Image (tube, rainbow, N blue to C red):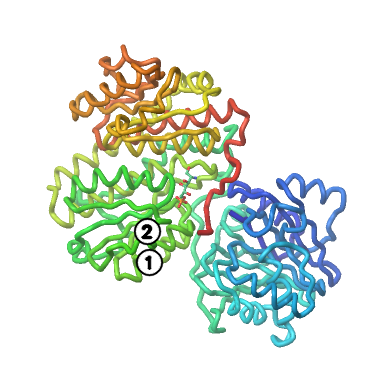
Amino acid sequence: MCGIVGYVGDKQALEVVVSGLRRLEYRGYDSAGVAVIADGRLDVRKKAGKLVNLETLLGADPLAESTTGIGHTRWATHGGPTDTNAHPHVSEDGTVAVIHNGIIENFAELREQLTADGVHLASDTDTEVVAHLLARTLPQAAGNLTEAMRLVCRELQGAFTLVAIMTEDPDLVVGARRNSPLVVGVGEGENFLASDVAAFVEHTRNALELGQDQIVTLTKDAVSIIDFDGHRVEPSPYSVDWDASAAEKGGYDLFMLKEIAEQPKAVADALRGRIGRDGRLQLDEMRLDDAALRSITKVIVVACGTASHAGMVAKYAVEHWTRIPVEVELASEFRYRDPIVGPSTLVIAISQSGETMDTLMALRHAAEQGAPTLAICNTVGSTIPREADAVLYTYAGPEIAVASTKAFLTQIIAAYLVGLYLAQVRGTMFADEIGRIMAELNDMPQKVDLVLDTVEPVRAIARELAGCSSVLFIGRHVGYPVALEGALKLKELAYMHAEGFAAGELKHGPIALIEEGVPVVVIVPSPRGRALLHDKLLSAIQEVRARGARIIAVAEEGDERITPFTDHVIRVPIVPTLMQPLVSTVPLQVFACEMATAKGHDVDQPRNLAKSVTVE
Ligand code: AGP
């Protein structure tokens, strides 16, 4: 998704803005640009491709010195990734520059109006429309950019975060948001705007949340906020809970490798402080009262991608502990299927970024139907937890790599905590049972650490299979969502066909895919728990092996029954059945990361992908 940075203060704006854009690179983009105000005029440079292209341009054709500037990394929606379509966009009279994240859904009619008025639009973008509208609205706004922004925003439909500067007032940056994220960084004699705190956290950790339909005006010494009706809004300050180094690679070649290695600590942090002195679970951010939780008759999880797989894992545990039916819905499908949702439905939105538009829209739909909502999120102050009735933060720390790893494990942990909390409030589990499960969960950081110590052979297997055209993943019970997650990791990183199946489904069609040499990754359940499940997986292994498949099994230590039927066995520690995803997923993350590395791909920023998909 697009990266946005705005700055006004005493430093050289270009340096602040470009380093801020670099910290937002992980969001995924395909062009970049900056604009500053110097000597009463706008100075703009923009370039297709990665930031390095823009920096090369700036080296050859430097910007004027300035202490006010905006910058943007664009993930193309309307119009291809070209120099002309890159942001910032400038009004025809050269007085206003604007950058934008989101989609302006009525931009076509706005374009037509402008064209009819004789305005020449240089780009194919929806954003350029705003630059012209702002400049044309300034006269009726008495030259006030904030007022002009307010009047223009009222004409726009869709999701947008806009940041603009104008030559008439060089010490001013104005931003507006509807649906797409925008945060304010409050410094000493300087202020920042960004789509993510990572852009300014090296300068200040004091942030302000911007709400829906709000406009923020920054000078170097002041920040003021109004809503789209012009009413003053008191900001909600918060402190960023991590520092710039947390968003660095810390000696790893890849953010993804760092974040895979951080998983034991992330799991421990997600669990920390959740048990009170009385031994009972305490979820401080759970702002839903016990009576409301007792009246719940159904849980619906809405999420996308990896987050939806975490929801699928959680379903098994939450249903087992609470005896409440749990539906897991792809957020992008949820509100279009006229779901059965009401005051007795708890809707849980799982989202690492807290800005995924599909999930946000599903959450809003649920709230409109009167359902209590809970967010499981990793980004403090982001939109989804702000709009939910309650939140459980995963505290995994910033996840920079596009491919989600530690967020997935901590989302499972958080969903388990919600399930145990529901069981505690509703009395479907005894305190000692909850205590036992919490003790087992508290062992997980060390178990995940053990996996990390033994994943080296996975890298060799990945390199051996790098030339394959596809890889299949099969699992049963909680191993089924793990199979889906393993396949997703391979798709998004190795750009290869990969598919996850419920092992029992193979004989209903997918087994036709099996031919000589096809790699099949099998997530094997413990032979100790549900022995029947283990037997079934063993049958599935033999069915595909008989047709030439290469078997890579992820199986627990000591399970020798499967060894004769496999080409490779990746061992994971023995853990309770419901916690197996926490250990069996890790080798699959390493597998995909290594395969992508072997293929020479950009692992942290895979092609076509964004870290947070803030458009529907
Ligand atoms: C996972 O590796 C992907 N990056 C993607 O599926 C992601 O999980 C999905 O877009 C949801 O993102 P969120 O958790 O920030 O809402």
- Decide: is 119 above or below 99: below
Amino acid type of the residue tagged 2 in the rendering:
Phe
- Earlier in the chain: of badge 2 and badge 1, it is 2
Residue in front for this viewpoint, 24 or 11: 24
**Whole-percent x and y of residue 117?**
76, 80
Secondary structure found at label 1: helix
Location of residue 212 in the rendering, given as x and y in whole percent from the top left corner: 50, 71
Q: Confirm whether residue 603 shows in the render.
A: yes
- Residue for point 56% across, 63% down: 183
Tell me the CA gap for discs 2 and 1.
9 Å
Q: Secondary structure at mark 2?
A: helix
Q: Which mark is residue 131?
A: none
Q: Is residue 250 visible?
A: no
Kind of residue indicated by mark 1: His
Nearer to us in this view, 597 or 544 = 544
Residue 365 is labelled as 1
Disc count in the image? 2
Residue 331 x, y percent position in the rendering: 40, 56
In front of the other: label 2 or label 1?
Answer: 2
Residue at left 61%, top 36%? Answer: 602
Decide: marks 2, 1 in contact (CB < 8 A)?
yes
Residue 583, image x, y percentages:
35, 32
Query: How many residues crowd mark 1 within 10 Å: few (<14), some (14–19), many (20+)?
Result: some
Quarter of the picture containing the N terminus is bottom right
Q: Is residue 361 above or below residue 377?
A: below
Q: Is mark 1 within 8 Å of ligand 1?
A: no
Q: Residues within 10 Å of mark 2 (few under 14, many from 20)?
A: many
Q: Which mark is residue 334?
A: 2
Q: Residue 452, located in which quarter of the rendered image?
A: top left
- Specify whether 373 is left or right of 422: right
